[in-house]
Image: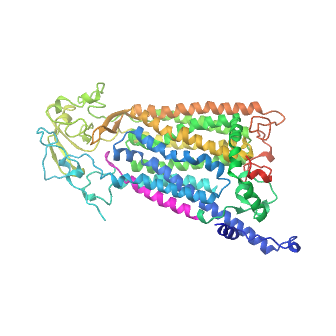
Amino acid sequence: MEISSKENTQFFSNNTILPVDRSSYKSESSASKEKQSCCGGIKIFLGALSFVYFAKALSGSYLKSTITQIERRFDIPSSLVGVIDGSFEIGNLLIIILVSYFGAKLHRPRIIGAGCLIMSAGTFLIAMPQFFMGRYRYERFPSTINSTVSISPCLQDKSQTPLSALEKSQPKINAGCVQTVAIIGPIFGFLLGSLCAKLYVDIGFVDLDSVTITHKDVQWVGAWWLGYLIAGVISVLAGIPFWFLPKHLPKPESRKDSSTSSEQSKFITEDNKDQHKSYQQQVKIAEMAKDFLPSLKNLFGNPVYILYLCASIIQFNSLIGMVTYKPKYIEQQYGQTSSKTNFVIGLINIPAVAFGIFSGGLIMKKFRISVLGAAKLSLGSSFFGYLLLLSLFAMGCENSDVAGLTVSYHGTKQMTDYEQALFSECNSGCACSKNDWDPICGENGVTYISACLAGCHASNGSGKNTVFFNCSCVGTLQSPSRSSSAVVGPCQKGNECPKMFLYFLVISVITSYTLSVGGTPGYILLLRCIKPHLKSFALGIYTLAIRVLAGIPAPVYFGVAIDTTCLKWGSKRCGGRGACRLYDASALRYVYLGLTLVLGTVSIFFSVAVLWVLRKRSSPQDETLSANGERGTCGTKSRKDNFVNSDRLIQTTYWPEKETRL
């Protein structure tokens, strides 16, 4: 293993120990080769790391895009899906602190490679239920499956029982750069989700000609599992290069005498055998562990760090909950398909976020903004972003007219108990079940939960082309004396809904951009107010807190809140409550947007506190706040020499023990 490491080091650097009589000078060709080798090694590492960021971002965003598909496939409520989504972060809890603390001292590339293998195994595991839980079954009456069989939807003869489509036709089984790429990952993740949502869930396992629904149907479930297999393969490929990289890359000749940040000096080091051997002797796990608690105490004694951490946790609760259920919100509020929803998010919203992050960094560099200015920019971004979010309350659609749920069978607004109101005089002679969900659209523009509850006595056609006749409940809304017809599928939203959806997209894009502008200034604020040797540890704690206190709970309690707006629950075949079939559009809008806005407002108060502390600690003599709350090196001044540029965020002085001490 040691021989291999030496060979890899020589691959990236041609540095050798020269004789004494030649140490005073070096030929231009040798210097040129050293520079090219060093730059090539760094480029290879950055390229491989960018691909890892892409794979991780793609997997995470694809999970968000499959939320509604998983709900319908396994008949589970939003709260349980929230637990599944939150569990995506649980694996990080086991090792994130150890990796952030010890990872800087160990073989980083191989740790990254091992992480990629674990990540790929996880994505493969998510897809496994598809292959062990049988085929997907959706409710369809026999009349919509085979036109040669005439069965009355209104089951006056109780011996006539509805069959699912797949019970009637059994399936045939057939034998820097890094951050930019990390933003591209979610784009491809949602686009992949859009593509897979158009493919039937059991594609390759059933005869697609026997499938009587389309991707526009409310019961449609796409091939959610396919994207996880693709993401798993990408993760495996992303981890391969790291197994062949050396532990350290050589430091460029031009930077050997210059001061570098602690993170740079930890990974890009000089290729000196004696120094490397001495470094290896100093790095002891026990010695590093001894300083763990003092370092943690030092970090939590920084008021700016603690306040910014609280603001970030609450804001990420808001953003994670909003992003997780955004596809569901668009589908239920505006009547859009899963495929179109994912396509819109991936092609419009995510690029707006990327452009916002880039703009924030550009503003910081162009105007040489100080730490105090970064705090102001981050606060302003959040304030105006959530202010724009407030306008989305006026851009919703009204509830669809669903007989027995949102309107009565006589056309009045529904105010009574929903389950009791599903039955009326017009369908009293039919043996209908309140648990069915096979919606049809009457010619009066009202949706009925099933053809049976619509009082339909005859049908014609098959599959998607089925037309129901003699529907007694459809006739009661126009003329009680005559019966009317209905077609398969729910009725479309009102005429104003497409226009509202367009307005929603415009405001949503502007909001995403505005909130993202404050991302880079906030990150710089975090780094500038931490002692140099604590940066890696502080970022690890920050990431851990975001995942534990935002990434895991936010999808869960957002899901619980959204479940309270459900009007019609489905039923599992084995008994018990299934997934929600229909939501109250108005209640969903107020719960989803309201919870997001309340959390965002609380985070703004903590951001104001950060700004207040920075103002209080600053003085006319340009005294600044250090990492432990004392006057020191963390600055609010805006002088040119103290500005954080794009090449290195923090200028610090290098000392030999920086690598082994916190």
Q: Is residue 514 in view? A: no
* 95 with respect to 618 (left or right): left
Compared to residue 119, the image places residue 565 above or below, namely above
Q: Is residue 585 in view? A: yes
Q: Split into 4 quadrants, where in the image is the N terminus?
A: bottom right
Question: Dividing the picture into quarters, in which one does residue 26 lie?
Answer: bottom right
Q: Which residue is drawn at 29% across and 31% down?
A: 405
Q: Residue at x 65, y 45 (%)?
A: 539
Q: Position of residue 466 (x, y in %)?
A: 21, 48
Depth check: 370 or 543 in front? 543
Q: Where is residue 638 in the image (x, y as percent from the top left)?
A: 78, 41
The magenta segment: 216-241
| Residue 488 among magenta residues | no
* 295 with respect to 351 (left or right): right
Depth check: 171 or 221 in front? 171
Q: Position of residue 547 (x, y in %)?
A: 55, 42
Question: Dividing the picture into quarters, in which one does residue 520 lie?
Answer: top right
Magenta: main secondary structure equals helix
Depth check: 446 or 383 in front? 383
* 369 with respect to 179 (left or right): right
